[in-house]
Amino acid sequence: MLWVSDFTYVSTWAGFVYVAFVIDVYARHIVGWRVSRTAHARLAVPPFGSFSTH
């Protein structure tokens, strides 16, 4: 198991939203994600239990 993360921003009509993803490298799918209107450290490195998963 190898997970990597990415943190990026997306422009919307209402401004920017910031998104953090955790990706399973071998399975090639998103393990979890989190969205916020502000870029803060808790968004970039959230506890795994608080991710939205699918």
Image (cartoon, rainbow, N blue to C red):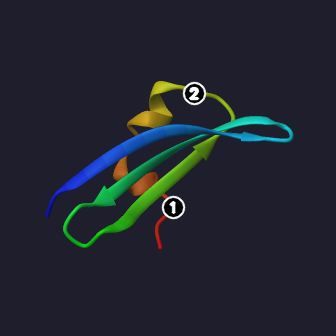
Compared across the picture, whether 20 is left or right of 36 comes to left
Front position in the image: 42 or 23: 23
Q: Percent x, y for residue 12?
A: 78, 42
The circle on residue 32 is none
The circle on residue 39 is 2
Front position in the image: 33 or 49: 33
Three-letter amino acid code at disc 1? Ser
Q: Residue at x 69, y 35 (%)?
A: 37
Q: Residue at x 46, y 53 (%)?
A: 50
Mark nearest the camera among 2 and 1 is 2
**Residue neighbourhood size for the residue with mark 1, other residues' Cα within 10 Å, grouped as few (<14), some (14–19), many (≥20):** few
Mark 1 or mark 2, which is nearer the start of the sequence? 2
The residue labelled by disc 1 is: 52
Front position in the image: 13 or 46: 13
Three-letter amino acid code at disc 2? Ala
Q: Pick out the residue farthest to the top.
A: 40
Compared across the picture, whether 21 is left or right of 23 comes to right
Q: Residue at x 86, y 41 (%)?
A: 13
Classify 53 as above or below 13. Answer: below
Q: Percent x, y for residue 45?
A: 38, 37
Q: Say whether marks 2 and 1 touch (CB < 8 Å).
A: no
Q: Percent x, y for residue 29?
A: 36, 69
Q: Residue at x 39, y 56 (%)?
A: 49
CA gap, disc 2 and disc 1: 18 Å
Q: Pick out the residue farthest to the left.
A: 1
- Please tell me whether mark 2 sits on a helix, a strand or a loop: loop
Classify 53 as above or below 23. Answer: below
**Residue neighbourhood size for the residue with mark 2, other residues' Cα within 10 Å, grouped as few (<14), some (14–19), many (≥20):** some
